[in-house]
Image: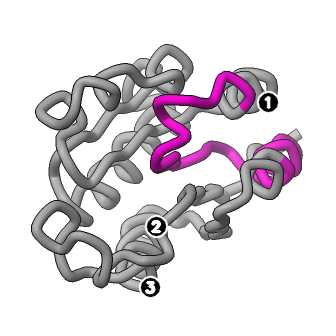
Amino acid sequence: MTTPRRLLLVNGPNLNLLGVREPAVYGHDTLADVERTVRDAAAARGFEVTAVQSNHEGVLIDAIHEARTTCAGIVINPGGLTHTSVILRDALSGVALPVAEVHISNIAEREEFRHHSYVADVAVVHVVGEGVAGYARATALLIDVISGRADG
C-alpha cells in the first residue's frame, strides 16, 4: 500500500479567533493564513493538506481517526486541549501516524498550567514559539520524517 501524500492539519479551540484574539500573544495572522502557510509548505514537497478547526473536541478526534486511512501525518496545534486532553492524546497515539505539535506562542514561557503538553510524548516534531511561521517548519520537518529523511 502506498503512503498517501496528504497531511491533516488540526487546529483546536479558539484558533478560529487568530488575528483577533490576544494579538500581543498570537499576532495578527488569521486561521486562513495558517492554512495557507501549511498548504504552501506541503505543496512544495508534493503533499496535499486537509484542514480542520473546531471548538469541539469530538470533531477533532473524529478527524484524527479518519486520517488513519487518508493521511501520512498530522500537524496539530491543539490549543488549550494541549494541557487538558488525555482523550486527544490517545486519539493521536491510536492512529499511529507521525505527529508534529505546533504552538504559536512559547508555552514554556507562559502561565504554569500551559507548561505541560499531553501531546508532547506522541509527537515526533515540536515547534513552539515561532508564530504562524512555525507551522511551515513543522510541516517540512514532518514530511522529512514521513519520507525517511529524518528520524521520528
Q: Nearer the viewer, mark 3 or mark 2?
A: 2
Q: Amino acid at mark 2?
A: Leu
User: Which image quadrant for residue 131?
Assistant: bottom left
User: Which image quadrant for residue 146?
Assistant: top right
Q: Dot 1: few (<14), some (14–19), or many (≥20) neighbours within 10 Å?
A: some
Q: Amino acid at mark 3?
A: Ala
Residue drawn at x 42%, y 68% as measured from the top left = 38
On the image, numbered disc 1 is attached to which residue? 95
Question: Could you tell me which secondary element the residue under label 2 belongs to?
Answer: helix
- The question of residue 66 being in magenta is answered with yes
Q: Nearer the viewer, mark 2 or mark 1?
A: 2
Please report the bounds of the magenta region as a residue range.
62-87
On the image, numbered disc 3 is attached to which residue? 32
Q: Nearer the viewer, residue 49 or 102?
A: 102
What distance separates the C-alpha of mark 2 from that of mark 1?
A: 23 Å
Residue drawn at x 33%, y 26% as measured from the top left = 113
Q: Give the percent coordinates (x, y) of residue 67.
A: 79, 49
Question: Could you tell me which secondary element the residue under label 3 belongs to?
Answer: helix
Q: Which labelled disc corresponds to residue 15?
A: 2
Question: Could you tell me which secondary element the residue under label 1 belongs to?
Answer: helix
What distance separates the C-alpha of mark 3 from that of mark 2?
A: 10 Å
Q: Nearer the viewer, mark 3 or mark 1?
A: 3
Mark closest to the chain's N terminus, 2 or 1: 2
Position of 120 compared to 87: left or right? left
Position of 16 compared to 44: left or right? right
- The question of residue 133 being in magenta is answered with no
Mark closest to the chain's N terminus, 3 or 1: 3
Residue drawn at x 62%, y 56% as measured from the top left = 7
Q: Nearer the viewer, residue 104 or 148?
A: 104
